[in-house]
Image (spheres, rainbow, N blue to C red):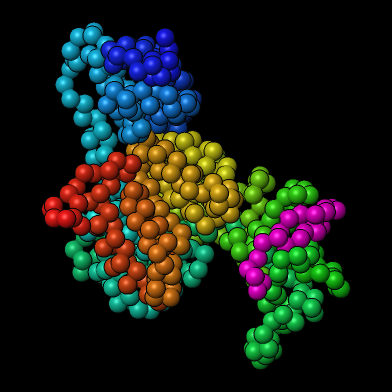
């Protein structure tokens, strides 16, 4: 009988173990063969031996998870054995341990060999890489807090010190804002905070990347009429034409994306920072604006002019303004990940940053391009700074193993789940699933993960966190770091997050629950 029939009939454990043993031995051979082929294809990126074992484990994990093991998992659970559901950190050793236990249950003899400590060694390696890249942080937390610095951090040294005192382990500078002079002061303030705290505070400098944005706008009078009178008055007072500031779009509105604005456009019209993308739009495609706050469907395309209907917007509408982000899910955006502005920023970043954030990286070719640009600027003998791969598109998700191996083969690497653009690109329905899969994949590759975007956003910006935000922050404990954005209440948000992470660290290590004592119920109560 096969495994399913044995399970259905409640067969003796020995018979079920024997059937599973045959299946897992075959699975092991299949997995090893596929993993070896994958690892061979990655060989050009693995210059040294420092990342080869991690790449090998990742290749084994990809081969194992390419199969549906639901039935085997249920059968292993029925026998009280590991279901391989936590095998990320040591794939083949986990399979071998299960095979050995099945052999003993099937009557082939006692389990041979010693206790497998591969999982513990893998966890220690990820922890070392986390500390080397993201700093030691506070001793009570295994999850580091990465804090985005606002422009005010260049003029207020106490701000950076306060963030570090509250629990910040590392700081982030967004190269889309300010410039080298301000960045240098921010880094100096971080070094001063580092000296005060008595621990290293690494600096992440985030390259802006080739984000698609709205440029010029043309807004018809009926849309401008939706603006509040005080808003229009302020625009006129500042000498700004209302159409330049944008207008409020509502569900059902028509709009146009075009290469050049016509003098008398009857509907809301906008140009894009990359007009060549208009060639790729097709009827039925969705276009999202301003981090997904406005969504419109392409109805008609003529040359570089696309007519759209707004399908998603807040009930009272949402103003679309220049320089707002544009996402084109499903459209292959073949734009170089390293822009001219990024290359200019690298002249300062290389030599000052401990980590370099790579926005909108999508292919191994993109990674090689950044590695070459860094090498051109790196002093002789200086180590390669850590690369933080920001996963923001569906293509980046699909290429993630190759991105990790390409980066990890030459230096330290971490992965950021950049959930803002990623959620818009892949759809909110997939976001929860994909962020889990990225966590698993990175554990198999033994690289640190940064959980980012809108963590405790309400607390940092408004001084009050929602229940959903608090739960999301707690979920981030399974990553090696959580990133907070800037806001007037950022210090309070760091301190709050630090406490949440400490509590969750008692109960969870990556996917594995810890059986720490429950403190809410200290003993039996009488009825």
> What residue is shown at x 32% (from left), y 63% (from top)?
497
Q: Is residue 392 toward the left or the right of residue 154 in the image?
A: right
- Residue 83 can be seen, yes or no: yes
Observer-nearest of 166 and 413: 166
> What residue is shown at x 20% (from left), y 57% (from top)?
520
Image height of 114 relative to 256, above or below: above
Residue 318, x across and y down, in percent? 65, 71
- Residue 274 can be seen, yes or no: no
Question: Which image quarter is the N terminus in?
Answer: top left
Residue 74, x across and y down, in percent? 38, 26
Q: Is residue 267 toward the left or the right of residue 493 in the image?
A: right
Chain part drawn in magenta: 296-317
Q: Would residue 309 be counted in the magenta stretch?
A: yes
How many labels, in total? 0
Residue 383, x across and y down, in percent? 34, 46
Image height of 358 relative to 403, above or below: below
């Amino acid at each position: 009988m096969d495994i399913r029939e044995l399970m259905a009939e409640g067969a003796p454990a020995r018979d079920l173990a024997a059937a599973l043993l045959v299946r897992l031995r075959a699975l092991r051979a299949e997995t090893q063969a596929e993993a070896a082929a994958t690892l061979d294809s990655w060989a050009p990126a693995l210059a040294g031996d420092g990342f080869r074992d991690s790449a090998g484990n990742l290749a084994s994990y990809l081969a194992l998870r390419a199969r549906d093991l639901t039935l085997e998992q249920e059968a292993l659970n029925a026998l009280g054995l590991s279901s391989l559901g936590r095998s990320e950190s040591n794939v083949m050793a986990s399979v071998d341990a299960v095979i050995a236990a099945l052999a003993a249950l099937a009557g082939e003899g006692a389990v041979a060999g010693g206790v497998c400590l591969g999982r513990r060694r893998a966890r220690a390696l990820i922890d070392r890489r986390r500390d080397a890249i993201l700093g030691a942080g506070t001793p009570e937390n295994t999850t580091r807090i990465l804090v985005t610095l606002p422009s005010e951090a260049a003029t207020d040294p106490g701000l950076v010190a306060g963030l570090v005192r509250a629990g910040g382990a590392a700081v982030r500078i967004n190269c889309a804002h300010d410039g080298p002079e301000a960045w240098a002061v921010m880094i100096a303030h971080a070094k001063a905070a580092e000296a005060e705290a008595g621990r290293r505070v690494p600096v992440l400098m985030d390259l802006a990347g080739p984000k698609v944005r709205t440029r010029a706008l043309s807004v018809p009078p009926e849309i401008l009429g939706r603006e509040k009178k005080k808003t229009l008055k302020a625009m006129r007072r500042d000498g700004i034409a209302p159409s330049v500031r944008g207008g409020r779009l509502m569900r059902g509105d028509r709009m146009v994306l075009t290469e050049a604005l016509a003098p008398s456009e009857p509907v809301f019209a906008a140009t894009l920072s990359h007009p060549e993308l208009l060639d790729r739009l097709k009827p039925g495609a969705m276009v999202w604006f301003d981090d997904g706050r406005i969504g419109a469907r392409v109805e008609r395309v003529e040359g570089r002019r696309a007519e759209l209907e707004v399908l998603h917007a807040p009930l009272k509408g949402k103003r679309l303004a220049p320089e707002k982000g544009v996402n084109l899910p499903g459209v292959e955006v073949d734009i170089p990940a390293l822009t001219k502005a990024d290359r200019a920023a690298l002249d300062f970043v290389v030599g000052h940053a401990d980590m370099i954030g790579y926005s909108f990286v999508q292919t191994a070719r993109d990674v090689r391009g950044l590695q070459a640009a860094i090498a051109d600027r790196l002093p002789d003998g200086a180590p390669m700074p850590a690369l933080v791969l920001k996963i923001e598109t569906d293509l980046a998700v699909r290429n993630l193993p190759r991105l990790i191996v390409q980066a990890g083969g030459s230096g330290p690497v971490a992965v950021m789940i950049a959930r803002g653009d990623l959620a818009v690109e892949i759809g909110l329905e997939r976001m929860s699933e994909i962020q889990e899969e990225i966590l698993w994949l990175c554990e198999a590759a033994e690289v640190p993960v940064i959980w980012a975007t809108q963590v405790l956003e309400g607390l940092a910006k408004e001084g009050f966190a929602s229940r959903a935000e608090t739960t999301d922050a707690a979920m981030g404990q399974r990553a090696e770091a959580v990133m907070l954005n800037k806001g007037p209440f950022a210090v309070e948000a760091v301190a709050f997050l630090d406490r949440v992470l400490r509590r969750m660290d008692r109960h969870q290590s990556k996917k594995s629950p810890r059986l720490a004592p429950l403190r809410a119920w200290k003993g039996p109560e009488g009825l």
